[in-house]
Amino acid sequence: MSQTLQLSTGTVDLSRQRFEGDGPPVALTTREAELLAYLAARAGEDVSRDELLQEVWGYAPGVVTRTIDVTVRRLRQKLEREPARPDHVLTVHGVGYRFVPADEDSVVDAEPQPLEPRADKVVGRDEALAALDRWATEGRDLVTVVGAGGAGKSALVESWLGGGASRWTGGIVHCDLTDAHDEPEILALVGEALGLSGAADGAAVAEALGGLRTALVVLDNVEHVVRILAPLVASWRTAAPGVAFVVTSREALRLRREQVLPVPPLPLPRTGNPEGPAVELFLRRAREVQPDFDGDLETVAEIVRRLDGLPLAIELAAARTRVMSVADILRHLAHRFELLKASGHTGASHRGTLRSTLDWSWSLLEEWERAALIQCSAFRGGFTLAAAERVLDLSPWPDAPWAVDAVQALFDKSLVGSVPGLRVRRCRLYESIRVYVEQKLQAPDQVMRSDGTSFTGPATQRALWQRHWDWAAGLGPSAAFTERGNLLAAAERARAEGMADVVTACEAVLQG
């Protein structure tokens, strides 16, 4: 369905997130398009800031932020002939904003485009919510919520604030740092969230924070600026002893007295028992798009297992039940990156699709980290750090660390998980990450050596498999159970390459 707005300055295509006027086409961000669509669907009406925060941004009631004002200002720069004297996106003082079209018939199918609908309480996160409550009661002043992309970190914090915002008598300041790339941009966004006028420098932000009492500052999506943000947060904690900070990131800030709250994927249902939070989340989202949804629970359970319990992937899969059966969804998981897209998000947001979420994480890695990650894809069923030493080769990067430290770095960035319940750490790649990096491994120029040549491609894959074969074929009988997945994978690859000796060695280990 077309979603276009006719302005006096040109035409906005909401579905493509693009404005076409007298000059070259101008791209709108996902947030800008969502806000404009919501206002346009209520053309001529006054829409309050609180309504926009809750319906478009998904914030809990009571959150204090200037995110809307910043987005409106950027929209006006792109759409209005005179941004300081707008014709279409108007400020209604004391209320919020109003959209005025060029004429009564200029809004075509401009339905609201809010965030994906969300239940009042996140699924399967009771322990994490209780931990946040406990730490708030104890007066902890810095909590970093850490997890993989799509684990639901922001949703967890929003749900927590929705249930206890009243405890922050000094208010809640929410600042999304997705668009920040350096210290001035961080200070500008935090300053805007605090209501500072003009350019905000470090001293102005520290002074504003110091004036708050019993307040909470939420710094959302900071993984790409962790190294820059950490010293700023350290200084703000000193300047504002009455303020607590909650940060969402894919890695911790590594500051003194920082409380880290890991947010792992949801627990998976056991075989033969299609219940649990991952299944519950799928059912909730499916019934939001199809109220009478009644899919086979065993198939749903297998879907969420294949998705490793990752909430974003589960929600995107469940949204497909509008037009697909659960059996169709399961079958198409072989092409998960094409399947798991949010139809309501058409821009470049790193949270709109499973692939864009992983692209965002990939973009933040050093070349040696990318090389280590793609080489971890050789393993099946997990791997020990000793196995990583044997299989990973980081010699093309003189500054790369020891293989064990490289895996630890990936673990710290929430890209490598651990197998729970074991005395010895056993690492694993989530299935979606494994599929993603295998595609990188097979294509040239996805990772570059220090000398500027391509590391990835068929030759690199073959060399990686050779190291994995050498390691697997040398395992003793005691490894038959724990390394079954690796032995089977090594034998299958060796059989395809005609390496009968490797196949025989792996099968001998499997047979004990």
Image (cartoon, rainbow, N blue to C red):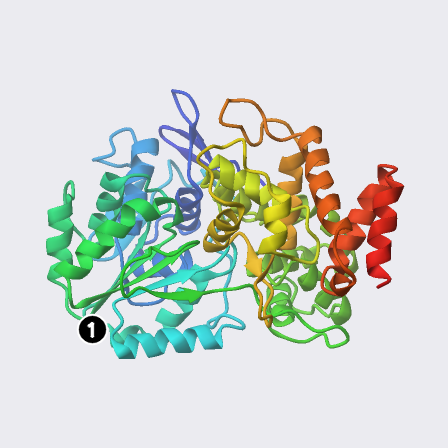
| Mark 1 crowdedness (10 Å alpha carbons): few <14, some 14-19, many ≥20 | few
Task: Specify whether 152 is left or right of 44.
Answer: right
Question: Is residue 252 or residue 105 the one in the foreground?
Answer: 252
The reply to whether residue 14 is visible in this rendering is no
Task: Specify whether 282 is left or right of 3.
Answer: right
Question: Which image quarter is the N terminus in?
Answer: top right
State the residue at coordinates (38%, 56%). 252
Residue 204 in the image, given as x and y percentages of width and height: 11, 49
Question: Is residue 223 or residue 292 the one in the foreground?
Answer: 223
The three-letter code of the residue at mark 1 reads: Thr
Question: Is residue 512 or residue 54 the one in the foreground?
Answer: 512
**Furthest-top residue in view?**
23
Residue 269 in the image, given as x and y percentages of width and height: 68, 72
Task: Specify whether 417 is left or right of 175.
Answer: right
Task: Specify whether 158 is left or right of 212.
Answer: right
Q: Tag 1's secondary structure?
A: loop
282 relative to 383, above or below: below
Question: Which quarter of the picture shows residue 470?
Answer: top right
Question: Is residue 250 or residue 407 the one in the foreground?
Answer: 407
State the residue at coordinates (65%, 46%). 377
The reply to whether residue 165 is visible in this rendering is yes
State the residue at coordinates (49%, 35%). 367
Question: Which quarter of the picture shows residue 297?
Answer: bottom right
470 relative to 418, above or below: above
Residue 477 in the image, given as x and y percentages of width and height: 79, 62
From the image, tell me which residue sits under label 1: 169
Question: Which quarter of the picture shows residue 294?
Answer: bottom right
State the residue at coordinates (37%, 73%). 132
Residue 350 in the image, given as x and y percentages of width and height: 48, 45
